[in-house]
Amino acid sequence: MVETYFDEVNQLNVSDKNSLQAVVNETEHLLTAFQKIAKEGDLVVGVNLLVAAQHLEIFVSDYAKKHLLANGNYSSTRVPTERHLVVEIQTIKSGYRKDVAVPSDVFQGQSFDDHNLLRERIILPPKLFEKQETAVLGIAYQDLHELLPDECQYLLDGKKIKNTKLHTPIIACSLSPAPSSVLAENITISFTLQDPIKPEDKPYCVSWDFNIRNLKQEQIQIRFNLVVAIAVAQIFFLAGIDATSKQEACIFVAVSIHYFYLAGFSWMLMEGAYLYLMVVKVYNAVVRMKLIYAFSWGFPLLMVTSSIVIASGSTEGIWGYVHGDL
């Protein structure tokens, strides 16, 4: 699903003036699809959504540099959206001496719908705009925080925080060009908790760390297991190629090679099925990794066990597994 989103975004030409609206529409469709899956009780991998959000930010930033900064267009522009997010680009002149609010005062207090006002904001100090004109990108997500699992990895001073839950909408801000040094003044970020919290609960302000690799992504998991299966099979093959003098060692090597090569082929099959779901099914696709793991590691085990049982019943006994006719 997310890979399809990446493909659609990569096909957009940032030089096209309509590409900004197109990328926002694609993001709306992605969030709608994930929301539908979440309501049906299927697993949503939160990291994928964060990577998709980063993809959106990069595209909008490139668009601002191409169409706004290059033309000296200093204004505040809000991209029309349906309900999941608010996207705004502000172009600020060099030497601007006032704080810049994200979302801007023009849009502050406007609603996603009739029941959910946009109260979150980021205040940028004027020091950021002293030396160069800057495009300020702001994105506020209405319900992205509801799609992220509570067991997301939150780190505070290098320590993982447990039993966490996001209580506010997510807001993102980036500058183009980015500041080249440490900020001279603090940035003010304010949120309004949507749900009441218990007296013993402690609120934290958290941010996304895109330097953490997305090892939980479905395609990465499939390819990682594929590499492991083939690598282990090759190790057994190279280490046990001459282990023919001892029957026990020979059988062990043969069983291991048989199992891990079958597992490798099973993971290849699952990657093919995964690509089919991403390309053909697109937004209606649901990837259940537990079933993929069960098939890819369980089916080879069933086949190898069946082969050993059949070989044991032959005239040569278990030794027939190595060189007999089954």
Image (tube, grey):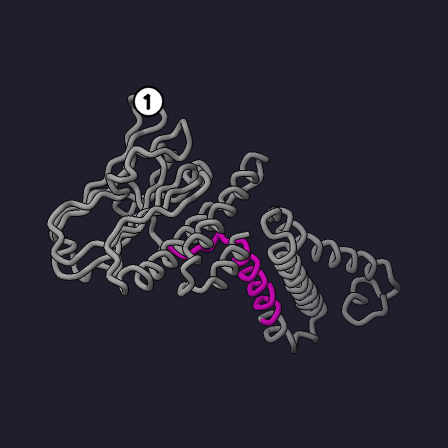
Q: Residue furthest bottom?
A: 242
Please state which of residues 57 and 213 is positioned toward the viewer in this rendering: 57
Task: Categorize mark 1 by other alpha carbons within 10 Å: few (<14), some (14-19), many (20+).
Answer: few
Specify the principal SS of the magenta part. helix
- Amino acid on which disc 1 is placed: Lys
Q: Which residues are magenta?
A: 211-234
* Quarter that holds the C terminus: bottom right
Instruction: Please give left or right for residue 152 compared with residue 255 in the image.
Output: left
Instruction: Please give left or right for residue 128 compared with residue 249 in the image.
Output: left
Residue highlighted by disc 1: 198
Q: Is residue 86 visible?
A: yes
Residue 224 x/y as whole percent: 53, 61
- Which quadrant of the structure image shows residue 54? bottom left
Does residue 54 lie above or below 37 as drawn? below
Residue drawn at (13%, 46%) of the image: 98
Residue drawn at (38%, 47%) of the image: 79
Please state which of residues 185 and 252 is positioned toward the viewer in this rendering: 185
Residue drawn at (54%, 54%) of the image: 218
Q: Is residue 151 visible?
A: no
Instruction: Please give left or right for residue 192 compared with residue 306 in the image.
Output: left
